[in-house]
Amino acid sequence: MAKKIKTNPNAGEIRDGIHYHQHDVVIVGAGGAGMRAAIESAPQASTAVITKLYPTRSHTGAAQGGMAAALANVEEDNNEWHTYDTVKGGDYLVDQDAAEILTREAIDAVLDLENMGLPFNRTPEGKIDQRRFGGHTRDHGKAPVRRACYAADRTGHMILQTLYQNCVKHGVNFFNEFYALDLVMTEVDGVQRVSGVVAYDLSTGDIHVFQGKSVIFATGGFGKIFKTTSNAHTLTGDGVGIIWRKGLPLEDMEFYQFHPTGLAGLGILLTEGARGEGAILRNASGERFMERYAPTIKDLAPRDIVARSMVQEVLDGRGAGPNKDYVFLDCTHLGEDVLENKLPDITEFARTYLGVDPVTEPVPVYPTAHYAMGGIPTNNDAEVLADNDTVVPGLYAAGECACVSVHGANRLGTNSLLDINVFGKRAGNNAVTYAKTAEFIDLPANPAQGVIGMLDELRASDGTENVAAIRKDLQDTMDMNAQVFRTEETLTKATEVIAGLRERYKNVAVHDRGKRFNTDLLEAVELGFLLDLAEVLVACALNRKESRGGHMRDDYPDRDDATYLKHTMAYLAGDPHSSVATDHIRLDWKPVRLGTYEPKARKY
Amino acid sequence: MSDAAVAEAGEVIVEEEAPKSFTVTLNIRRFDPEVDDEPRWVDYDVEMFPTERILDALHRIKWEQDSTLTFRRSCAHGICGSDAMRINGKNRLACKALVKDFDISKPIYVEAIKGLPLEKDLIVDMEPFFDSFREIQPFLQATSKPEKERHQTVEQRARFDDTTKCILCAACTTSCPVFWTDGQYFGPAAIVNAHRFIFDSRDEASQVRLDILNDREGVWRCRTTFNCTDACPRGIQVTKAIAEVKQAMISGVKL
């Protein structure tokens, strides 16, 4: 049988040692958003998906609890309530028309996935089952509502697998373990237009240039700027960093979400779905402290509020453990049946990594860096913005790397699996529509020159600085100074430390000089992106002298709508390699698109 | 947490000692395709805490001793399936293999999974593995056009739950002696993923997949050695799934 023939490694056309490809649509990233886009795009237009990881390795697969949609399968619900919750959950920094799209299209997004084969948990009637989740409420905050569609605590895994399965069905052309390093822009009639993407083939070390009419960035987040994080090692913000280095703006970078329930000391995620099923947070004395912070919905308050409350308990000396530095997630009253059947993976994580059995013992937890609300600004059609209003023709972004903004200052749990499906689909469709009428734009003379220069310089470096040491110092300072509570003093300290690390990075060493699977080189490049994004995040955080959603300034503890009910827009305006943040970061503002919901004090 | 627990009265008992680190020797089978003709074993001593993972040890070597050491990893908690490797002769995910579960008086041997072409150090070519996966048509095939979701009872959903857990890490397939012989066998992971659809009440293409797996490189090559079941980091009853597919070929699919 004609099986196991070595697959064509997608060589393209080779000129001067560089591989050239041409596709109508080029998608960067094969997590949920990238693959959801590919499923729309591939049947309609020539599509290439460039991905640093095999698609099924993407971090969408680590999402656990659910995907929100007001299906009303188990109790009364509607998407207007969902919109309200999303806007209030985002501390009114949400663009309300975008949130309406998100919640309206949520229904079809879930049904699409079911129809594609996703094995959701079922109700006794055979419909998709739904569970409670933080911040999702009935009738504008009256009580928690069952809105999260789920598959045990493996919803992200099932979404990732289902999308990959459907990409196989559609014959999507993946370039696996290709690391995108640059976006190619060409000036046409005074307008910067997208012409392609430059990528590095990890298996060979070769450079590939993908010419595309439209390009979609779906590159995920950058949690690895922090030490304690639920994010994968590979989540280094490469896509967001590429956009930044092109001089395109980044939006709301100061808004970073800390998930309340990471395994203490490790940061491994334990789903909010545990609290959705009834688990309770307790401090060292066993008190259900969320009753004090959110009297109505208690443990099911949004993540920013729960994470802050947990840290406050520890700061006030009510933390548990030998160092009083965590609290407990108590699942013991849920019973073995619920844990084994509805929360099997997190039950195993606690057993494997902490040696704690959630059936009989409370689990030590502490907030863990989880999700970037900010990122590449887009409009509701997933088109990337070059400023507050101007679209970059042919460039799209979706998923965690993008900022629509449907999450505002704090994302609700289950809204990100929703976001990747709704806006991934929109990006795919719109990129195809664009490609159908657009022409290929000529690539500049040497489109890969910048990338080759950067890689050659790193590979030939006889520097003395260690990649891992710089990264560790970055992560330490971010956890120490830019985490759940921030002040002028801590953020200034972080700025200084990052400046020193950016200087050290100029002298970084790469010891592996080889071409094939050079992960030493890869980590050095990734570190460059981490340093850029951490610097931007801290600059934006210093600039916002108020507290809103995930951005808590201890020195400005109140929300200040008069001054700050607006999005931050950060621009690279100077030497990208400079270590002095203020000489190359320019900050501006963009209005929030308000709507039905007037900003009010946020009580739960 | 074993020493500190919330007592019923709500008091916390704290008797925890600071955990002690110790030296672990890892013996890693290394191969640089640009330099080496043959793989070679290299020793590394690493300071480890008992609750740390083999992945932590590999990182410590890469980040502190020898940055040329090459392996795949991503999520680091057993979900993404990147870091399947052969540890003391058994296929494991490095991120789920805890140091305390090994006899550290002896070196811990770490090498790439077997049966797929070795690329560099602990990295193998995964394409043949994914080729087999793609060949069993791993996607729902249903002609009905429901207005909303297709209905499925709780029992129907439970029928194939075990095989939905697969993360395509290849630990099972590359632990199979039949797969090692020539790599032509579809392998356990492909059959697991076929099972996931064959026993899904919504799917209409079970017979197509059964015909594919009735091939001479299909399920009948399984010799039920149970290596795959032992290797699966997700606890899937792989051998049982293969047996159910065999049974379905003989007497039809029973949902």
Image (cartoon, coloured by chain):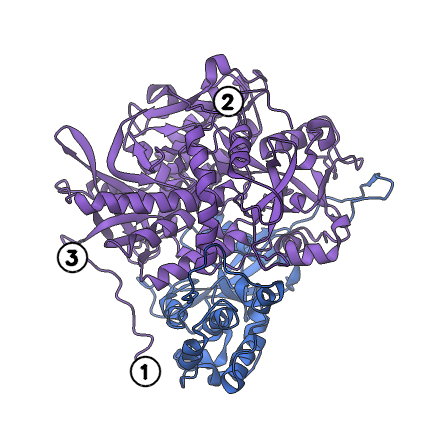
Chain colours: A purple, B blue
CA gap, disc 1 and disc 2 = 63 Å
Residue located at (51% from left, 74% from top): B175
C-beta proximity under 8 Å, tags 1 and 3: no
Which image quarter: residue A580?
Answer: top left
Q: Is residue A226 visible?
A: yes
| Camera-side residue of A163 and A244 | A163
Q: Specify the subunit that label 1 lies on.
A: A
Q: Secondary structure at mark 1?
A: loop
Residue located at (66% from left, 29% from top): A309
- Quadrant containing the C terminus of chain A in the rendered view: top right
Q: Which residue is mark 3?
A: A13
Provide residue A159's location: percent of width, then percent of height: 47, 54
For the residue carrying disc 1, how many other residues have a C-alpha within 10 Å: few (<14), some (14-19), or many (20+)? few
Q: Specify the subunit that label 3 lies on.
A: A
Q: Which residue is mark 1?
A: A1
Which image quarter: residue A389?
Answer: top left
Q: Which residue is mark 2?
A: A491
Instruction: Point out the residue furthest to the front here.
Output: B147
Q: Nearer the viewer, mark 2 or mark 3?
A: 3
